[in-house]
Image: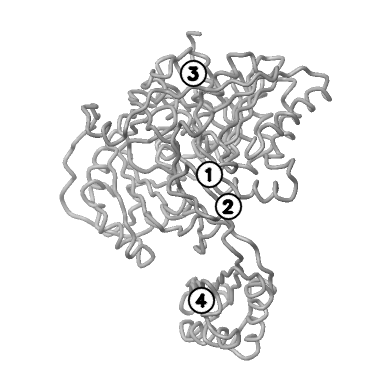
Amino acid sequence: MTRPVRIGNYSGFYGDRIAAAREMVDGGPIDVLCGDYLAELTMLILAKAQAKDPSAGYARTFLTQMEQVLGTCLDRNIKIVANAGGLNPAGLSSKISELSTRLGLSAKVAHVEGDDLRGDTSAILPPVGATKPVSANAYLGGWGIAEALSAGADVVVTGRVTDASLAVGPAAWWHGWRPDDFDALAGAVVAGHVIECGPQATGGNYSFLREVTDRRYPGFPIAEVAADGSSVITKHENTGGLVSVGTVTAQLLYEIAEPAYLGPDVTTHFDTVRLEQQGPHRVRISGVTGSAPPPTLKVTLNDVGGFRNTMTMVLTGLDIEEKAAWAEQALFDVLGGRDRFAEVDVRLLRFDTPDAGSNDQATAHLRITVKDPDPRKVGREFSGGIMEVALAGFAGFHTTTPPSGESAYGVCRPAAVARHAVTHTVVLPDGERRSVADPPTADPAAESAGSRPVVTGDAASAPGGPTRRAPIGAVLGARSGDKGGNANLGLWARDDAGYAWARDHLDVERVRALLGPEVDGLRIERFELPNLRALNFVLHGLLGEGVAASTRPDAQAKGLGEYLRSRVTDIPEVLLGS
C-alpha cells in the first residue's frame, strides 16, 4: 500500500484507561489498534497470577476492552495488535476466540510466542544459576506480527515483544518491508517508541505545563507511518492534550540509554532523528537511520527476592533530626538490632518548614523499610515494633498507616540470549505454526566502529553575558524513568541557544552534584542528541535490583527529571528573558 498506515495506541501499561480502546476506534479513522501492556514489573505481576492459576498470566483488562470494540474493528477492517498475552499468549488467544463466538463474530485470532524461556534457561548469559526465575523472557521483534497479519489475522496477541514492535510489525506488513530495510524499520521503531506510552506523547507528564492549554484528558497518540519509515505523530480531533515537538521529544527521551538503540529487528540511531511541527497536533519524524541488529536478544529475568515491609513515622515541629535518631534507635532496640534483617533502609523525608502556617507543613516522615527471606521477621513483628515505640518515643508520635503485614517482592535481572536459542513462533488463526527467521545481524562493537554517518546538528556556541541564579526548568524540560536497576534522565531545550548552554554546562559531575548524595558513587553516563537539542543521562544502579525491589519513594524514577529541573544554577540572563 502506498499511503501511510495509521496506528493508534490505546494502552501504555497494564491498568491504563479502559475506555481508551473504544475512544480510539470511535474517534476517527485508523488502520491498526495497538496496545502496550507489558513492563518489567508487569511480568512479575503476571507471574504471581499464573502461580495461583496456571491458566492466567495475561492482561485480563484486554478482554474487557475487546468486548467493547471487536465488532466495530471487524466491520471497519481495523487490525488489533497487543502484547497483552504476557506469559500466556496462547491462553489469551483462546479467550479472544471464545469472546468472538459469544458476540456472534468470526474474528481470526493469531498469537506470537517463543519469548518465554522458563523451560530452558541454559543459554541465557550471564548464567541464571540454581535459582529458577519466575519469569524469563526474550524481547522479540515485529516480524511474527507481520507474518500473522499477512496470513489474514484480525487480532494478534503476543508475549514479550519490544514495545515498539507493536508498530514495527504492522508497518512492515502494510508496506511490504524486507528484514534488511533498516532505515524504514528504524523509523517505525521511533514512531512506536513515541506512541507506546499512550498520552505521554500527547501532553501527559509534560514539563512545560503552560503549553498544554487543552486540559481535558489527552487523546491517545496515532502514528502515521509512511513507506520510507518517516511518520507523523498526531491524535484524534476534538481530544485533549497537545502534540508538539516538545511532547514528542519528551517521549523520545523516555527510558533510553545510548543513542544506538539496540532492538531485535534493527539498531536505531536516535542521534539521527529529526522533528518538525507540520501543523496543529502534527509532528513529523524523519531522517532516522538504522543498521543491523545485534546477534543476541535482550532478556529480562524476575526472581522472588524475599519479603519486605515499610512503616512511616510522622515527626512534627521542632528537633526533627533528633527525634528521628531517637525513634530509629528505640525501634531497633525493641526488634533486637538491625542485623536481624537482610536489608534495612531508613529515610528521613523533610517536608517541614520553620514556623509553619499549618500542622501539615510542620511534618517530616521517617520511612523505614526492612527486607528478609523470612516473612515473619518483616511482618507484624516489625510493624508491631513500631507500635511499641508509640508511647515510649518522641513527642507527637503517629504513623501514616496502621501496623501492616509483609509482602513479597521481586528482583529484576537483565541478561541476553543468542538468537539461535530462541524460536520466534507465530501461531496462525488456523492453528498452523510458523517459525520466524532471524534478520541479518552485526556485532554492535563493529557497527559502532564503522563509517555510519551521524547527523551532528547545530554546534552553536553557548550564550555568554551576565548570569542569574534560576531553576534549570526555566530553560529545560525533562523526562525520566526506569530501565531495570538503572534510571535515565533526559533533558531538552526548546531552542538552539538553550541546548548549547545545557551541552556546555551540564556535565556528569555537575549533574551529580545537583542530584545530591543519593547518586554518590554511581556510574553516570552522558549522551548528546543534538538533533533533538537533548542530553540523556543514565544513572547506573539508582534503582538497585529493579522497581519491585527498590526502596526509593519514587521507585521508578518518574520524578527524578522534575527534581533536577527544580535545582538552581547559574543561567545566562539572555535565556531567561525579563
Dot 2 amino acid type: Lys
Callout 1 touching callout 3 (CB < 8 Å): no
**Residue at 49 percent of width and 21 percent of height:** 224
Dot 3 amino acid type: Ala
Residue 371 seen from this side? yes
Element at badge 3? Answer: helix
Residue 309 horizontal/vertical position (percent): 61, 69
- Number of other residues with Cα within 10 Å of mark 3, as a class: few under 14, some 14 to 19, many 20 or more: many
Residue 48 horizontal/vertical position (percent): 67, 51
Label 4 belongs to which residue? 356
Please tell me whether residue 274 is drawn above or below residue 569 in the rendered image.
Answer: above
Label 1 belongs to which residue? 121
Marks 4 and 2, the one that precedes in the sequence:
2
Element at badge 1? Answer: loop
Element at badge 4? Answer: loop
Dot 4 amino acid type: Ala
Mark nearest the camera among 1 and 3 is 1
Marks 4 and 1, the one that precedes in the sequence:
1
Marks 1 and 3, the one that precedes in the sequence:
1
Residue 485 horizontal/vertical position (percent): 45, 54
- Is 467 left, or right, of 403 in this rendering? left
Residue 174 horizontal/vertical position (percent): 52, 14
Label 2 belongs to which residue? 132
Q: How is the image coloured?
A: one colour
Element at badge 2? Answer: loop
Distance from label 4 to label 2 (Cα)? 52 Å
Mark nearest the camera among 2 and 3 is 2
- Is 137 left, or right, of 25 in this rendering? left
Distance from label 4 to label 3 (Cα)? 60 Å
Label 3 belongs to which residue? 172
**Residue at 66 percent of width and 29 percent of height:** 23
Distance from label 2 to label 3 (Cα)? 36 Å
